[in-house]
Structures are given as structure tokens and as C-alpha cells.
Amino acid sequence: MSVKLSTRQVGDVSVVDVAGRITLGEGSSALRDLMREMVGKGQKKILLNLGDVSYIDSSGIGELVSGFTTVTNSGGEMKLLNLNKRVKDLLQITKLYTVFDVHEDEAGAIRAFA
Amino acid sequence: MRENKHHVPETVERLLDSTLESVESAEELALSVAQRAGFDDDDLMKIGMAVRESMVNAVVHGNRYSEHKKVRFSVTHNGERYTIRIADEGDGFDFNTLPDPLAPENLMRTSGRGIFLIRSFMDEFEMRRREPSGTEVTLVKYMVSK
């Protein structure tokens, strides 16, 4: 299964539910395109729910970094929600876990946006 | 890591096109052999990712998706060592110029983590130049608990 992305609005926060594989090719480019589209539409508060991500490779990690930079440079905020153990381990060994604002419950993540 | 009790030595070799489909098939092949060798889920995840990153390097950065260039892939285990070799036909690169992805100045780069992840997930990792061209990487996972 490649990546599946669906978006929903919770107040002024755009939540992206990500499922499947974020890997080089379709998976990472779909996420990149969506993030750019959201920023282009002026959405400043983006929460990536990675709870159903089964696999992420270095290209996928690069897309998370790229998305974070794109949103931040536009004056917005991007946070991560529901990391499974594998994604969490990957972000920890690449020293990115502390770069991202990571949350385990959606309500708390929504409240954490300024 | 696994207990070495019932292994049956096995070798699989393939000559693959320089496509992303080959990345998928190499990962599947490596994982099927690793499963038969008895690795647990945690090691299977590490092996799968190391193979994927190595294949992406060969297909994308080595052969640059050329339809005229192939990737030679082999996976073998002998009860003690599970070994993968991946060789491309690209121009090669200077192994000493790889930036450290954990350095503060590189942390927010969008690429450059593949080889770091391979080193993190495998017990041995070696890169060498091939003649007349190309790069071969060898990945090893130990099979016997120490």
C-alpha cells in the first residue's frame, strides 16, 4: 500500500491523516505536494497524524523535514501526532525527534498550537 | 538477532533494472530470505530498510535510472552471517565526502541520511569501487546470538 492522505479541519488547525508508506516515489511526493498546497492556501497550523504510517524511509524523513521547513518559513507551525515505535525510533536516531513538536493525543496537539 | 538452530544456507542472485520497482523487489527478496533465516520482526525491519536505502542509492544516485545500466543484487546466509551485496554501474563517488547527517548544520537537510541509517541497522557495512565503474556495497547482519 502506498501512502493515503486525507485532510480535515479542527478549528483553525488542518489535520492530515497519513496512512501507509512514506517512501521515495509516490509516497513522499504526494506528501510534499499536499504540504505545499496547504501552505499555498495560507494554512498556518498543520498537524500530521502519522498513526497509520506503516513504513517510512530516509526520503520520507526528508519530506517531513521539508514540510516542517516550508510551513515554518511561511510563518506557520507543523506538529506531529501519534508516532508509532518505528517512526519514533527513526526520528530519535536521526536526532530529529526534538526538532519536531511531537504529541500523543490529538486534543493536546490542537491546544498546543499558538 | 536470532538463535542459529535450524538454518538452511541459501543464496539468491538477481540482475535488476534501474527502477523503483527493483527497489521494491530487492527489499521483498531480502526479507523473504531473512524470514526463512529466522530473524525477528525488529531485525526484519532493519534489514528491509537497509536494503531499500542501498537499492535507492544504486538506482537513483549510481545508475541514475539508466535503462542501460543494471543493479547486481545478491543475498546469502550461511548460518552465521546474512550478507547482501548490491552493485551498480554508475560513476561512483568519493566516500569521504559524505556529510554527517547528525551535525547541527546538516540536521535540517532533506537528504543524506541513507548511508547513516544503513550503518545504524546492520552489523557490518562496506563500500568499494568496482572496475571499470560502479560501486558495490556489502551489508552483513550477524545470525548467531552472542
Image (cartoon, coloured by chain):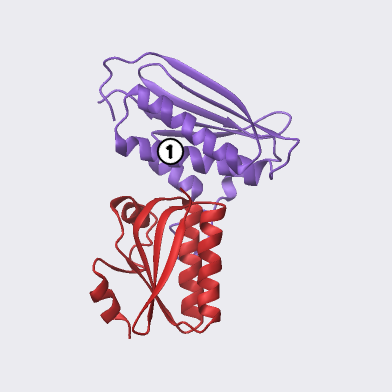
Chain for mark 1? B
Report x, y in % for residue B53. Answer: 51, 43
Q: Is residue B93 shown to the viewer in this render? A: no
Q: Which residue is mark 1?
A: B48
Judged from this view, the residue extending furthest toward the right is B68
Q: Please, is residue B74 above or below residue B127 in the view?
A: above
Q: Amino acid at mark 1?
A: Gly
In the picture, measured across the screen, residue A61 lies left or right of residue B61, that is: left
In the picture, measured across the screen, residue A89 lies left or right of residue A65, that is: left
In the picture, measured across the screen, residue A31 lies left or right of residue A55, that is: right
What residue appears at the point 33 percent right and 86 percent down from the top-left corner?
A114
What residue appears at the point 33 percent right and 50 percent down from the top-left corner?
A86
What residue appears at the point 36 percent right and 35 percent down from the top-left corner?
B44
Report x, y in % for residue A1. Answer: 46, 48
Write down which chain is painted red: A
Q: Is residue B25 shown to the viewer in this render? A: yes
Which element is circle 1 on? helix
Among the 4 quarters of the image, the one containing residue A95: bottom left
Among the 4 quarters of the image, the one containing residue B69: top right
In the picture, measured across the screen, residue B44 lies left or right of residue B86, that is: left
Q: Where's the C terminus of chain B, which quadrant?
A: top left
Report x, y in % for residue A71. Answer: 48, 77
Report x, y in % for residue B20. Answer: 60, 43
Q: Nearer the viewer, residue A113 or B88?
A: A113
